[in-house]
Amino acid sequence: MKKNILIYNFLAIGLCSIVLSSCSSRYRVKVGEQSEKKIFNLKYGDSRQQTMDVFIPASFNKETPAVIIVHGGAWKIGRKEHMKMIQKFLHKNNIPTANINYRLVNKNTTYKQQVEDIGLAVEKINALAKEEGFREDNYVLLGESSGGHIAMIYGYKNPQQIKKIISLSGPTDFYTENYTNSFYSKYSSRTLQDVVGEKFDRKNLSEEFKKASPIANVSNIPTLMFQGDRDILVNKKQGLALDSVLTEKEIPHQLIFMENTGHIPRFFSKKKRENVIFPNILKWVKG
């Protein structure tokens, strides 16, 4: 049953990607009546996947961090358009945002290149900051699912740029016995082999899986986490593991643990999106 649900979720995400692939990838700029600006498909690298949508509200608090949004999709699929709902919500609440595409995992790309892409995107956004009136190196990284994973890895290693992290259903642990001895690892480890670029051998696990785990890389950056108790794609113990490490190290954080909730609840549940997820995101960004 669990495997059938897993397959269904991946098919649903894949279908969304196929539909969205027909969306225009043309660079364009829209300026609103009150001087708000929306820049679509701004390039930040040589790859066709290295593009972003930047939304600048007409007015905003210059001390409030801008939000860099990182889509999910099991590291191998997905597009920034999946996160359009969150970007529109933040824009409506006068928060500057950059919603990024990045290189997807394949034979020549691992999560390390995806983390590099966040860095390249930050450089491009910094170049816009003075012109658009927001502060350089003053960002919240918001990632969903696999996007939450690479957002945490980059954010914890770059505290000079990233002031807060928000992870929606992001995986955190690829190396402890809690993961390697779990049923969850039996159907997720094959994907992780491609993501990390090393063979997953439970009896002789490469150090690279630890290096790829957010729980082994935490730093003193306030972190907001959302985790569903019925999440099959990212098991509930993943969010709980990061919560335990952050608590032990006394790093400011909040875990919003949602009962009767599966993966990416903001996508499937309007009630949770409007009453739980979006209000807490806004509070965390502005707090």
Image: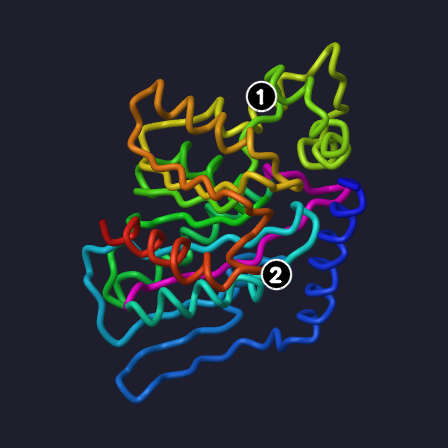
Q: Residue at x 50, y 43 (%)?
A: 259
Tell me the number on the disc at residue 210.
1
Position of residue 84 relative to residue 187, above or below, is below
Q: Secondary structure at mark 2?
A: loop
Q: Position of residue 6 (x, y in %)?
A: 74, 45
Q: Position of residue 168 (x, y in %)?
A: 49, 47
Assess whether mark 1 and mark 2 are in contact (beta carbons under 8 angstroms): no
Span shown in magenta: 94-112
Q: Quadrant of residue 160?
A: top left
Q: Position of residue 256 (x, y in %)?
A: 41, 41
- Give the labeled residue for mark 2: 79
Q: Amino acid at mark 2?
A: Arg
Report the front residue among 136 and 82: 82
Q: Residue at x 63, y 22 (%)?
A: 179
Number of marks in picture: 2
Q: Residue at x 50, y 79 (%)?
A: 28
Q: Residue furthest front?
A: 260
Mostly what secondary structure, the magenta segment?
Answer: loop
The CA span between labels 2 and 1 is 27 Å
Left or right of residue 179: residue 259: left
- Residue 102 drawn in magenta: yes
Q: Amino acid at mark 1?
A: Lys
Give the mark, 2 or 1, whose residue is nearer the N terminus: 2
